[in-house]
Amino acid sequence: GDVSTPYDDDIVILVDPDMLMQRPFINDFSQFPDTIWNRYYRKHPELLLRKVTQGHPAAQDYSFGKSWLTAAGKNLTYVVGPDSPVHQVTMEEAEYVYAAGPPYWMTARDAYRISYHWSDFLPRIFELKPVFMAEMYGYCMAAAHLGLKHQMARAFMVSNVEMDEGEGWQFLEHVDETACDVSQFKDSVPHVIHFCQRYSIGEYFINKYLFPTDILSCDFPLVEPPPLDILSKANYSHYGDGTTELWQDSGRKSKRRYRHAFMICSLFPALNEAATFYKKHHCPNGANYEKLWNHFRWKKEHGKRKASSSSS
């Protein structure tokens, strides 16, 4: 599991498919404030290199904490073997330097070494803990097995509008009703949006599990984007399960409202840009570029068509 190549020092960044890049990945964190790092590294800034080098990867801090270590229970030896350094990992280390998630930053050599052990440990972890988090636990096990403590940031990503400490929402702290004008955040937004939650402002809603699978087909319309002043028009969020949340004018609820708007106003144009690019290269007979798709309207109209078809 250890080999040397001319690409050893190249930097590899691993992200999830449901991540939208927001700014360039540059291997220099020296200009970033200490507030981007997790609680452990804010307390011990002397341990930070503020860049990725051999043996010193970086990653987003995830809220599963030490669960990756306890997942195997009494069967840890079965997963990593009797002599693995994983057995010596403390609970503090498990939570603050190994509970890593994407985006992961590492050298190509470290990426190979982690992948080698990750692919070895994962089947046994999943056998003991058959949950979707098993693949992330496998990564953590591999990193700990190799002693690759991660420089853990809380501000490489935004995802959960409910999260404060663990994600990089600080850039929206002093935002106003213009949160939908996302261009103003280009120099302060985290590196990726991880759209693994549900987001809504007014009648504009998205959930990756409820998103149309034919969005890239030539005949399917593009997504209807909200107006830039949506926050002055909508003081509620309508969700895919039919529930509606009313937003207050101040406090924590107001922060969540701005976060929902930012996510919607970032994701919708990006989805349209991707769909447009695809259609221009794969629809020789023309394509539908009208921005008409809205979750609720589409669901209502197609529900009527299905009911009409079944009754005829």
Image: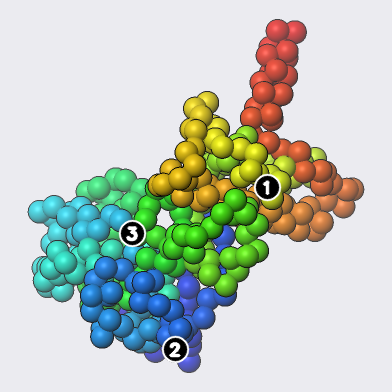
Q: Quadrant of residue 125?
A: bottom left
Q: Distance of mark 2 from mark 1, alpha carbons?
A: 46 Å
The amino acid sitting under disc 3 is Glu
Residue position for label 1: 229
Residue 183 position, x and y percent, is 65, 64
Query: Would you name the residue on which mark 3 appears?
Result: 165
- The answer to whether marks 2 and 1 mark residues whose Cβ atoms lie closer than 8 Å is no
The residue most toward the front is 249
Comparing marks 2 and 1, which lies closer to the viewer? 1
Residue projecting furthest to the top: 311
| Of pointers 2 and 1, the one earlier in the residue sequence | 2
Q: Residues within 10 Å of mark 1 (few under 14, many from 20)?
A: few
Rendering coords of residue 159 (x, y %): 46, 54
Please, what secondary structure does the residue beneath circle 1 have? loop
Report x, y in % for residue 290. 81, 43
Alpha carbon separation for disc pair 3 and 1: 28 Å
Q: Is residue 137 left or right of residue 201?
A: left
Q: Which mark is residue 48?
A: none
Amino acid at circle 1 = Asp
Residue 303 visible in this rendered orientation of the protein: yes
